[in-house]
Amino acid sequence: MVFLWCWCLKFILEAKGECDSQIYCSGSLLKKIQLSGIYGSKDFVDKPTIKPLDEVLAAASLLPENSTNDELQDFISTYFGPEGQELILANITNFNSTPSFLQKIKSPLLQEFAKHVHNYWPNLTRQVDLSFMCEGCVSSFIALNRTFVIPGGIFREIYYWDSYFIIEGLLVSELYDIAKNMILNLLDLVEIYANGSRIYYLNRSQPPLLVQMVKIYYQATNDTALLYDAFPILIKEYNFWRKNNSIRIVSPESKKLYTLNRYIVNNNAPRPEGYLDDFNIVELNNTLNSTAREELYADLAAGAESGWDFSSRWVKELFKNSSTDDNNYEILRTLNTDAIIPVDLNSILYMNEITLSEFSEKIGEEKMINTFKNAAKKRLEGITDLFWDEELELFMDYNISNFITNSTTILDTFSYITNLLSKYPGSPPITLINSGLQWDFPNSWPPLNYVLIKGLINFHNYDDNDSESEIKEFIMNLTKNLSQRYVDSVLCTWYSTGGSIPGYLNKLSGVKDTGHIFEKYNTLDLSLPGGGGGYDVQVGFGWTNGVLLWIFSNFGDILKEPECLSDLT
C-alpha cells in the first residue's frame, strides 16, 4: 500500500492535505464509475486494487468513452477487491465482559442490555492488515498503526468527531488501551487533517474534539505521559483552526472586532464518497456558472466538514416539507455553509482554549497558560456579542451574508427541550424543519443528545450555591428525562428489529433480524431508526453505543424499562 504514514505525513499543518489519486479522488475513471451508479459512491472508493496502480490505469485508459455498466463491472471485478479488505477484527486482550459500571444499573433487564452493548465492542474494533496487497497495489485507506473502533456499516474507518463519543463509551467499558490507541491514531492523523482515515477526506476536518478526547482520557487514567506527548500536536491543531478556518467579524451592535471560526473547504469537485449526489446537485437541471458551481462544491464539502451533512441549518432558503431526492437537491443548491458562523463550533473551540490553558499548567508550560485564557475570554465575548439573541434568549448561528442570527436549528434553551419532550415520544429532534435532509426533523442524533445531557449536567454543577433549588431540581429532572428518552429510543428500536435477552426479553415473533443499534433515530416513533442521508441507515453503531454506555454509567440507578417493550409485544 503506497499510502503509508511516511507518505501521509508530508501533509503538514500549513494547510489541509490534498489528494491527487487518479482512482480515489479525481479524474475520468472516478467520474465514469461514480456516475454509472453501479455502486454506492462510497463503496467504490473503499475498494483496494488487486493489481498494481500502473496496470489499473493502463486498463482504464482502454475503456470506451461511453462504457456500459457491464463493461465497468467487468473492469472493477478484474482490478479491484472488496471494500474494507484492508481491515480485520482486532483481538482485544484482557476484555472484561462485566465492567464495574454495570453494577450501577438498577433494572436487571437494562443491565443485561448494557452488557450486550458493551460486549459488542469487539465487533467494531479493527486493525490494519495489508498482507493481501500486491506490490504496487493501492487503496484509499490510510494505514493506522494501532487498533481502533469504527462506527459500523459503510463507515469502515476511524472518524474524527465520532471518536469522542466512542471514547466516552470505551472509558466506561474500561477499555483504556483502545481509547488511548484511538487518540494516538488521531494525533497522527492531525498531520493531514482528515475527517476520517481515507485519502479522499484529506481536504477537510470535522468538529475539533481531539483536545476534549485527551481531556476525558486523562481524567479517567491520569496518564500524564500522553498529555506531554499530545500537547504539541494539540497546539498545531489549534493553530490550524486559527489560520485556515477563521474569519474576522465586526459586531453590528458593539462595533468590536472578533476572530471566530467557521467550516470552509477549498474544493471545486464532487466529494469522492458522495460523488453522484454532489454531481446531480451541482450539474443537473441547473444553470449555475462555473464560479457558482465551484462555490457550491465547496459548500457541500464544508457541510460534510461540519458533521451535519446535510441540514437546513446551512441553506439560504427553506422549502416546503418533502423527503424526495429532487427536493433535497433543490434545497442543497442553496447551501451557504461558509457564510454561517456556527455557535457550536466556536463553543467547542472556546472549550478547547480553556482546556489547553489547563493542560499548559499541568505540564509546566507557564507562558501558554494566559495565552489560552485570554483567547478563551475574547472568544466568549464574541460568542455573547454575536450569537446571543436577547429577545429570544437563544444562542444562534451568525450568518455573515445577511448579518442576522439563524435560529432555525439551535435548540439550546431548556424550555424548548421540555416542549420537544412533550410533543414527541422519542429523543429530541435535531431541528424542527422537515426538509428531508438527514440532519433535520424527525431525526434524533446520539452526539447531540449527549451534548444536551452533558450541558445540563454542567449547568447543574456550576456555581451550586448561587442557584435556586427549584431550578436545580428542574434541570436535574430534565437531564434524567433526556437520558431515559435516549435509552428508550435505542432499546425499543433494537427490540423491534429482533433484539432479545434470554430470560429477560423474548424475541418478537416474525422478526428475522437479531436486533440493530442505529446511527440515528426517529423522534416520532420509538420503533424506527432515522432516515435520509443518501444511503441506507447504518447499524453498529459506534457513537450510539458510546453515548448509551455513558448514560448508563451516569444514570443507571434511575433509568426504567421502556414502556415500548410491552407495547410492541
Image: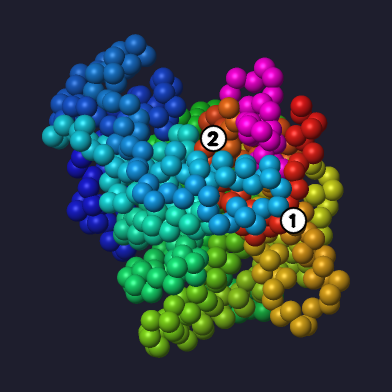
Quick one: label 2, few (<14), some, or many (20+) residues within 10 Å?
Answer: some
In this rendering, position of residue 28 left or right of residue 394: left
Q: Secondary structure at mark 1?
A: loop
Q: Magenta-highlighted stretch: main secondary structure?
A: loop
Residue 196 location in percent, x, y?
40, 48
Reply above or below: 508 against 205: above
Q: Out of 43 and 332, give the one closest to the viewer.
A: 43
Would you name the residue on which mark 2 appears?
539
Figure quadrant of residue 494: top right
Would you name the residue on which mark 1 appears?
558
> Which one is earlier in the sequence, the residue at label 2 or at label 1?
2
- The image quadrant where one finds the N terminus is top left
Under mark 2, the amino acid is: Val
Is residue 144 visible in the rendered image? The answer is: yes
The magenta segment: 488-513
Residue 42 location in percent, x, y?
42, 33
Q: Which mark is residue 487?
A: none
Residue 296 location in percent, x, y?
50, 44
Q: Out of 504 and 133, give the one closest to the viewer.
A: 504
Figure quadrant of residue 62: top left
| Residue at image point 50% right, 74% down | 355
Under mark 1, the amino acid is: Ile
Q: Out of 47 and 335, give the one closest to the viewer.
A: 47
In this rendering, position of residue 229 left or right of residue 325: left
Is 522 covered by the magenta stretch? Answer: no
Residue 291 location in percent, x, y?
45, 45
- The image quadrant where one finds the C terminus is top right
Is 490 covered by the magenta stretch? Answer: yes
